[in-house]
Image (cartoon, helix red, strand yellow):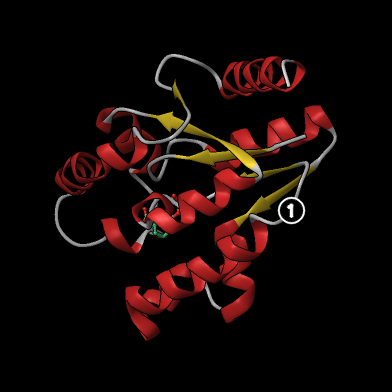
Amino acid sequence: MKNIVLTGFMGSGKTTIGKLIAEKLKIDLVDTDSEIIKEFGLTIDRIFEIYGEKKFRECERKVIERVSKLENVVISTGGGVVLEPENIRLLRENGVIYFLYASPDTILKRLKDDNSRPLLKNGDKLSNIIRLLNLRMPFYKNCDFEINTDILTPELVAEKIISIHMTKESRK
Ligand code: S3P
C-alpha cells in the first residue's frame, strides 16, 4: 500500500489523526518531528533556539529523504515540510499526500495554551497564524487531497482519509 502522508499547519491534527489511521489500519506511524527530536536529542523548541531554523530544515530534509523510502506506513509531517518542493516530490514517490485544513480560529483554539511551536512564540498568536497560513496555502494546495478538519472529529477525518486511500488503492 502507498504511504498515507499527512500535511497541514501546526494544530491541524496531523499527529492525532495519524495515530488513529495507524491504529485502524494496523500499520506503523512515523512522525517527522519525533524523528528530528531523536536526531538532536532535543525538543523542537530547543533545536530552533540553539541551532536555528536553517539547521532544523536541513535535518527535516534528511528525515524526509529517509522516511519517504518506507512503504505501508502513515507519515505525519511537520507543518513546514511542504515549503521544500523536493520534500513533496520524495514523499509522493511512495505516498499519497493529504492536506488537513484548519481555519485560523480553529488553530488558535487548539494551540492557545501551547508554547512548543517556536514559529508562533513571538508576538500575537492569531496574527502569526494568519500570516504564515496565507504564505503557505499555495504549498498546501499542491497536495493530493484536502480535508477540512474544522467541522469533523479526528475519528471522522481518519475514516475519511482511509476511505479515500482504500478506494485509490483498489483502483490500481
Ligand atoms: C513547524 C511545525 C512544527 C515543527 C516546527 C516547525 C512549521 O510541526 O515542525 O515547529 O514550520 O510549521 P507541527 O506542524 O507538527 O506542529
Instruction: Name the residue at 58% across, 58% down.
Output: 32
Horizontal side of 17 relative to 72 (left or right) equals left
* Quarter residue 120 falls in: bottom left
Q: Looking at this view, is 163 or 40 the one in front?
A: 163
Q: Name the residue under label 1.
A: 70
Residue 43 vertical position relative to residue 171 in the rendered view, above or below:
below
Q: Looking at this view, is 167 or 63 the one in front?
A: 167
Instruction: Name the residue at 57% across, 80% down.
Output: 40
Q: Which residue lies furthest to the front in this view?
A: 172
Ligand 1 is found in the corner quadrant, namely: bottom left
- Residue 142 is situated, as x and y percent measured from the top left of the image, at 37, 36
The quarter of the rendered structure image containing the N terminus is top right
Q: The residue under label 1 is which amino acid type?
A: Leu
* Quarter residue 94 falls in: top right
- Residue 29 is situated, as x and y percent measured from the top left of the image, at 72, 46
Instruction: Name the residue at 38% across, 42% down.
Output: 9
Q: Residue furthest bottom?
A: 50
- Residue 59 is situated, as x and y percent measured from the top left of the image, at 50, 74
Secondary structure category for the residue under label 1: loop
Counting every numbered tag in the picture gives 1
* Quarter residue 35 falls in: bottom right
Label 1 neighbour load within 10 Å: few <14, some 14-19, many 20+: some
